[in-house]
Amino acid sequence: MKFALSRAALIALALEIMIVAAFAVFLAKKPEKHEEKVVMLTFPAPPEPPKPEPKPKEAPRPKPVHHEVHRQVAEQKPMVQQPKIEDPAPTPAPSPVVTPPPAPVRPSPPSPPDVSSTFRDEVNGAVQAAMRYPYAAKMAHIQGKTQVSFTYLDRQASNPKVVTSSGYDMLDHAAIEAVESASYPPPPPDLAGKSLKIVIWVRFYRLDEE
């Protein structure tokens, strides 16, 4: 019985040794490497183009020998180019001068008739008598004179205007009021029914300061 077991053990051991040896051989065997073969292809170099043959040098041409030859050269007169005469441009005919018709002569307005100095003094006295000295100007001791103009027709005055100011509005207004409120004398017989341009001075002075 013991002999049978030992024999079985030997057989098992031998199998293990064979397996191990087979495995070692398998590991020891290396796979062969497949080397890639590289094929080198060589092409022949292209033939060089033929070199151009050098051109033969041209022999220098002989210089022409100028023989002195006495030639008679005919004198040639220079041709003078005559200026081209152009036809003169036609002179434009002068345009007719149009004379504008004379402007119609307007009759000048009739000059105002002369006013006698006597009648002027009467009108001036009437305006001076109608003058009212402004109270504020009198208290402020303001004095002066205003020149006024107006149109006189049959004891009536119209269109009064200040010609020369006194420098004070209150005096100028008082002079206009005096012209409008004055009682005028009748005109001379030769000036009746005619418009007269009157220009006078209206004076503003205090009697106690004259």
Image (tube, grey):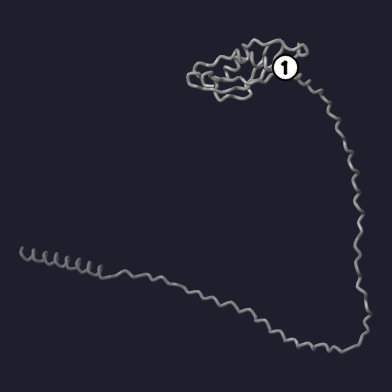
Q: Residue, x 61% and y 79% (percent of image)? A: 48
Is 96 placed above or below 201 here?
below
Is 39 placed above or below 12 here?
below
Image position of 29 (left or right of 103) = left
Q: Residue, x 67% and y 11% (percent of image)? A: 184
Residue 195 place in picture, x, y as percent: 73, 15
Image position of 15 (left or right of 53) = left
Query: Which quarter of the figure has residue 74?
Result: bottom right
Residue 200 place in picture, x, y as percent: 65, 20
Residue 162 place in picture, x, y as percent: 62, 21
Query: Which quarter of the figure has residue 161?
Result: top right
Q: Which amino acid does label 1 sit on?
A: Leu
Residue 131 place in picture, x, y as percent: 58, 14
Q: Residue, x 91% and y 53% (percent of image)? A: 88
Image position of 138 (left or right of 99) = left
Q: How many marks?
A: 1
Quick one: label 1, few (<14), some, or many (20+) residues within 10 Å?
Answer: many
Question: Dividing the image into 4 quarters, which one contains the C terminus?
Answer: top right
Is 203 placed above or below 80 here?
above
Q: Residue, x 55% and y 20% (percent of image)? A: 205
Question: Dividing the image into 4 quarters, which one contains the N terminus?
Answer: bottom left
Which type of secondary structure does the marked residue at label 1 adopt?
Answer: strand
Q: Which of 117 and 165 is in front in this view?
A: 117
Check disc 1 and report the residue beneath it: 196
Query: Which quarter of the figure has residue 96?
Result: top right
Q: Nearer the viewer, residue 147 or 7?
A: 147
Q: Which of 72 and 102 is in front in this view?
A: 102
Q: Which of 177 and 52 is in front in this view?
A: 177
Image position of 35 (left or right of 170) = left
